Amino acid sequence: MNADILDGRAVAATIESELRTRIAQLASAPRLAVVQVGDDPASTSYIRAKSRAAERVGIKLAHHHLPAGTSLKKLKTLIEQLNSSEHGLLVQLPLPDKLEPALTRIVPERDVDGFHPVNLGKLLRGEPALRPCTPAGIMELLERSNHSPAGKHAVIVGRSNIVGKPLAVMLTQANATVTVCHTATVELAHHTRQADLLIVAAGQPDTVAPEMVRPGATVVDVGVNRTAAGLVGDCAPSVAEVAGALTPVPGGVGPMTVAMLMTNTVTAAED
Ligand code: GUN
């Protein structure tokens, strides 16, 4: 078997075109501020992808690039200014530990990353809120490519606050039955082989080998690992020979994450 490709680039392009229509109804272009502290190369590359998408849909993105030694006070002050002047605001992660307390200064209405405790609380309660972009993008990709999770056994590998945990909530709300595996899971392969829908967000290449996948399963690879061999996901390439459908890396979840950030920004501008 060779897996069908779940084309995140194509679905993201459709979403961008829907956003251009929504933006045309607004009195002014939505404004998004992206704050970067230091020079993490992965962050720089993510911000470049966000800037290009913003340009394509008609969002005004302002990149605030601060030096690595920026103080907590300075970052908090900038965030408070941007809360008032922008529709959406995010601080690119990772952030030095001592600056983490600044993140909760982003008001929930501007929190287009969906990381604020208020937005995560609303997600848990099934109330409307800005949703974390990567899990929201995975849900959107599945629904729009006719792989609805309803009634499926979804197995997630990874329990991060950004992907695994919020995705477990979204899949449960979409009527999947959900298992969450993590670094302390005993016999990971036993669980992954039960999955109709396997989502791998472990941040490690080769976390999932083909013998860990039920033939015909839908596999979503969230990994973005920069290796000597280039950009690779969390699944071994030969998983494509067993899976029924698979997201490519690059071109799967990544473009969907960016499309959801643009969606959250337009939603914040509409409210
Ligand atoms: N770093 C890696 N992924 C993300 C993300 O979705 N949002 C932010 N702010 N930083 C990240």
Image (cartoon, rainbow, N blue to C red):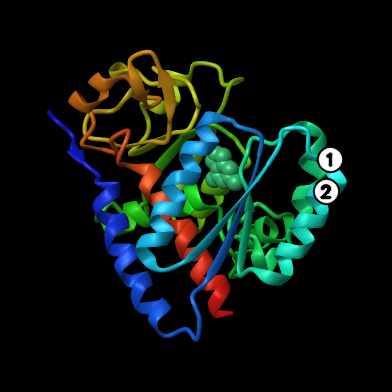
Q: Which mark is residue 71?
A: 1
Q: Is mark 2 within 8 Å of ligand 1?
A: no
Quickly name the residue at label 2: 74
Q: Nearer the viewer, residue 234 or 35?
A: 35
Q: Answer with left or right where residue 15 lies relative to residue 104.
A: left
Dot 1 lies on which element?
Answer: loop
Quadrant of res 19: bottom left
Task: Tell me the distance, in whole angstroms, between the alpha carbons under discs 1 and 2.
Answer: 5 Å
Q: Residue furthest top?
A: 228
Q: Amino acid at mark 1?
A: Ser
Counting from the top left corner in percent of width and height, residue 101 is at 82, 44
Q: Is residue 121 above or below residue 247?
A: below
Q: Answer with left or right where residue 195 lies relative to residue 61.
A: left
- The reply to whether discs 1 and 2 touch (Cβ–Cβ < 8 Å) is yes
Work out whether residue 176 can be spotted. no
Dot 2 lies on which element?
Answer: helix
Ligand 1 occupies quarter: top right
Q: Residue furthest right?
A: 73
Q: Is residue 203 above or below residue 258?
A: above
Residue at the image position 43 percent from the left and 60 percent from the top: 54
Q: Is residue 197 above or below residue 240?
A: below
Quarter containing the N terminus: top left
Q: Answer with left or right where residue 226 lies relative to residue 109.
A: left
Counting from the top left corner in percent of width and height, residue 104 is at 77, 53
Residue at the image position 65 percent from the left and 65 percent from the top: 110
Quarter containing the C terminus: bottom right
Q: Which mark is residue 144?
A: none
Residue at the image position 36 percent from the left and 24 percent from the top: 232
